[in-house]
Image (cartoon, rainbow, N blue to C red):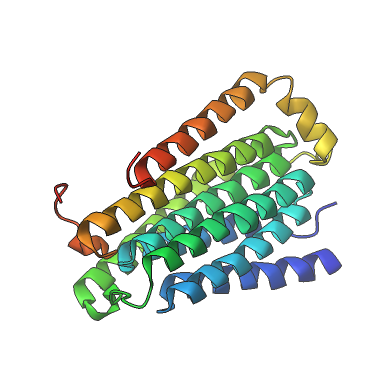
Amino acid sequence: MMLVPYSHFIIVAFILFAIGLVGIFTRRNTILVLLSIELLFNSVNLLFVTFSRMTGNLDGQVAALFSMAIAAAEVAVGLAIAILLFRAQKTIDVSKFNSLKE
Amino acid sequence: MLETVAFYIFAGILLIAALLAVTLRHPVYSVLCFLASMFSLAVLFWLLKAYFVSVVHITVYAGAILVLFLFVLMLLGYDKEPPALWTNPIRFGFAIGFSALSLAGLFWVYKIAIVGAASPEPLSQAGSIEAVGRLLFSQYLLPFELLSLVLLVAIIGSVVLAKKDL
């Protein structure tokens, strides 16, 4: 017997997604933009697990585990690119990145 | 009863910490707020009886991803934090508007697709490590093994990118 309705979990996930989007659009620090993308990943993970519980099978939890592994891979490559950009442009401000050349 | 109270407390912490993470000026505070939100999210997973996912979530996010974020933040130096876009009202209005629009779209999908969908059945099994592991090593064996290849590619890619002279 579940006391909290599933819809509340879904609403929390939706609000988390919107917060992540605000972060992506308003932050100018590259690293914090990547952090906001992690918030989107987490919102989707929460939805996966909620639906897994709602429908009564575990496939959603496996999908959430896969999504976590992809998030870890994504953040490693993303931060490596952030280091490269900082080395080339001497800044981590996303609005200053306008050239692929050094 | 306890479960309900725990849900509302930790959902509140999750959303407030996430909001602080995207609004605080100091990047290190942002990352630490993100850490707080990850722990509350792990509690929500636990309340959904996804025990294995909850533990893996803490290990991966607090143990690996957050450390990586803090490390890179300190490596690049955060004293020259560029000003956030709060100062530009057009960009800020666009960000809030777009997020509100996507939130409305999500609720619309929720209303037409999820509420109308079938009645929730009781979960026959909790997401214990045994149940999830059984699924992971039978039905999802190939994607699970391919995931190690993805992680290997990410390791090699980030080393090649970040190393100065290979």
Q: Quadrant of the C terminus of chain B?
A: top left
Please determine whether, in this image, residue B115 is positioned above or below residue B139.
Answer: below
Q: How many marks?
A: 0
> Which residue is at the front of the view, A83 or A40?
A83
Residue A96 x, y percent position in the rendering: 19, 63
Quarter of image, res B87 = bottom left
The outermost residue toward the front is B165
The answer to whether residue A71 is left or right of residue A96 is right
Q: Is residue B116 visible?
A: no
> What residue sits 38% from the left and 45% below the top?
B163
> Which residue is at the front of the view, B62 or A19?
B62
> What residue sits 83% from the left and 41% below the top?
B126
Quarter of image, res B101 = bottom left
The answer to whether residue B124 is left or right of residue A45 is right
Residue B102 x, y percent position in the rendering: 38, 55
Residue B9 x, y percent position in the rendering: 71, 73
> What residue sits 77% from the left and 56% below the top?
B47
Q: Quadrant of the N terminus of chain B?
A: bottom right
The answer to whether residue B91 is left or right of residue B152 is left
Residue B100 x, y percent position in the rendering: 38, 63
> Which residue is at the front of the view, B158 or B118?
B158
